[in-house]
Image (cartoon, rainbow, N blue to C red):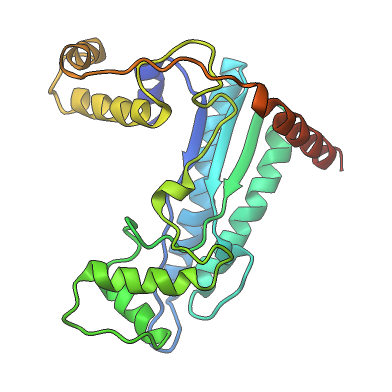
Amino acid sequence: MFADVMLAYGGLDAVVVTAGVFVAPDKSGHIEDRQWALTFGINVTGAYIVADEAYKIFKKQGLPGNIVLTTSANAVVAKKGSLAYDTGKAAANHLVRELAIEMAPLVRVNAVAPATVVKGSTMFPRDRVIASLTKYNIPFDDTEETEGLRDKLAQFYAKRSLTQKPIEPEDQALIFPDDQGLLNPPSMFDAAEATVTGNVLVQAVAAGRFDSLTAARQHVRENVQTTRFEPGDSAKWESVRRRFNEIEASYVEV
């Protein structure tokens, strides 16, 4: 995968690890040993392997990089019914700390630890949503549409948070040090659009729809209406950046 990225884009700037798995326990709250191993294999070992491979590339490039692992609020607050997942995410949290020390100062390693994101998540198929509604004694009808059931569960989780609002995918947006508005050159897409378009083009080339990435880019130029984004004023970020750097430096020294 990294080889394809290097060929398509000429380098690597940041890696975000979002892969994760939650294995629902049986009615007694138990999961099999192989399911425990699977949970740690994906949520902890898998994240480490991806980060380690990315670090090799960052070192060869000799340029600063960013790695972000997705952990979970469950890594901090224990709850019933998710023993393997919660302890695995707790391990992932400390993995982030260890990687941050190991890879500094070339690579900045951070984590985003969302609470439960129901909307748009493949981790919440209908059967799991129903199981959760049942576990928390939330009234529902078997004839209700899946999205309606998801909304009920999302509202329940929202009431346990400080914001009192359901967390949605858009709330998990990640900002890297050189995100949109802080860039020097102008761009024809915003950060999110550029990422999506690039992913689609690479997949289209791999599927044989275009002979090369150059041909795919030309197709976009000829068929997609673009908007020019000029660099924003980064002055407002400077005080925040300085404060963050001070905190980071203090943490690393400890």
Asked which quadrant contains residue 51, the reply is top right
So how many labels did they put on this image? 0
Q: Residue at x 54, y 73 (%)?
A: 160
Q: Residue at x 50, y 73 (%)?
A: 159
Q: Is residue 200 left or right of residue 113?
A: left
Q: Residue at x 37, y 73 (%)?
A: 153
- Image location (x, y in percent) of residue 79: 56, 77
Asked which quadrant contains residue 74, the reply is bottom right
Q: Is residue 234 left or right of residue 218?
A: right
Is residue 222 visible to us here?
A: yes
**Quadrant of the frame with the N terminus:** top left
- Image location (x, y in percent) of residue 234: 62, 21
Rendered view: 62 above or below 2 = above
Rendered view: 203 above or below 162 = above
Q: Is residue 107 left or right of residue 186?
A: right
- Image location (x, y in percent) of residue 164: 51, 67
- Image location (x, y in percent) of residue 249: 81, 34
Rendered view: 137 above or below 178 = below
The residue closer to the viewer here, 206 or 131, is 131
Asked which quadrant contains residue 28, the reply is bottom left
**Quadrant of the frame with the C terminus:** top right
Is residue 106 visible to us here?
A: no
Q: For the view shown, which residue lies furthest in the right direction?
A: 254
